[in-house]
């Protein structure tokens, strides 16, 4: 590899951007060259800048990921793009590849696949996370495929009203002290709620909590 792979990250939740950037920064061959919080900002950024890979969320304000792809195609800009989605809908993935997407990762498996996806796409090979590949395989064989994963209703129903409140504040990047002040709780109580959320949702950190909340439309 001649130089570092330059990656731009686009998502409408800052906590997810920070989580993805933290993962990318663990690889010496990758350099993050900025981020965007809206689809419009993505288009504007690429008018004046360049990146080897764009990691793009489908659900973006102002312009969604599909519209961004269409704009790149219209301008004949051959940008390598890895799509992120809260849902693993095989039919949507197939549509996105026709618009020029080079890879597709569901947010629930981003931590496992993002580094491999970037290097694969950079080297000219398409990349799909395992859950996406299974859906595409079934679609190609003519089998019935699900319209994308559904919210984890059983897990959501196990959360108390207070836990959901804490989860929303975590996603909004409130500190433990700020949450305690806002909810009129002690810091220790807030930490207990945080630990319970990590255990119930089977995730390891705030990024995992945020991904669950986004996937299940809690925020």
Image: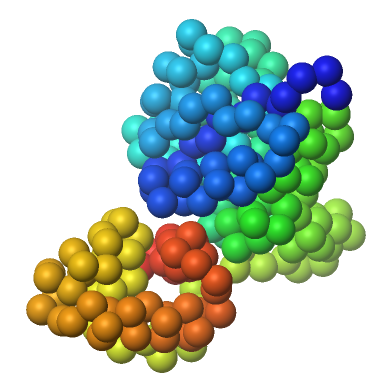
Left or right: 127 with respect to 24? right
Quadrant of the drawing holding the C terminus? bottom left
Residue at image position (55%, 42%) is 21
One can see residue 100 in this view: no
Number of numbered discs visible in the structure rendering: 0
Residue 9's x, y, as percent? Answer: 53, 35
The correct choice, above or below, for 77 with respect to 125 in the image is above
Residue at image position (46%, 18%) is 45
Residue 5's x, y, as percent? Answer: 71, 26
The correct choice, above or below, for 151 with respect to 25 in the image is below
Quadrant of the drawing holding the N terminus? top right
In front of the other: 72 or 196: 196
The correct choice, above or below, for 144 with respect to 77 in the image is below
Residue at image position (78%, 29%) is 122
Residue 147's x, y, as percent? Answer: 61, 63
Left or right: 127 with respect to 46? right
One can see residue 1 in this view: yes
In front of the other: 26 or 162: 26
């Amino acid at each position: 590899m001649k130089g570092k792979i330059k990656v731009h990250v686009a998502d409408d939740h800052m906590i997810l951007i920070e989580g993805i950037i933290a993962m990318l920064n663990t690889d010496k061959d990758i350099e993050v060259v900025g981020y965007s919080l809206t689809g419009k900002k993505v288009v504007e950024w690429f008018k004046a800048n360049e990146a080897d890979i764009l990691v793009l969320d489908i659900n973006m304000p102002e312009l969604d990921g599909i519209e961004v792809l269409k704009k790149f195609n219209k301008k004949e800009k051959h940008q390598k793009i890895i799509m992120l989605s809260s849902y693993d809908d095989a039919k949507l993935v197939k549509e996105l590849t026709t618009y020029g997407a080079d890879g597709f990762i569901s947010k629930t498996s981003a931590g496992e696949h993002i580094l491999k996806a970037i290097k694969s796409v950079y080297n000219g090979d398409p990349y799909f996370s395992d859950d996406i590949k299974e859906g595409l395989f079934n679609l190609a064989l003519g089998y019935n495929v699900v319209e994308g994963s559904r919210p984890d209703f059983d897990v959501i129903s196990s959360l108390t009203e207070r836990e959901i409140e804490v989860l929303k504040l975590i996603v909004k990047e409130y500190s433990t002290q700020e949450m305690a002040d806002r909810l009129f709780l002690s810091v220790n109580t807030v930490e207990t709620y945080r630990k319970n959320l990590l255990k119930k949702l089977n995730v390891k950190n705030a990024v995992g909590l945020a991904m669950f909340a986004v996937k299940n439309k809690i925020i």
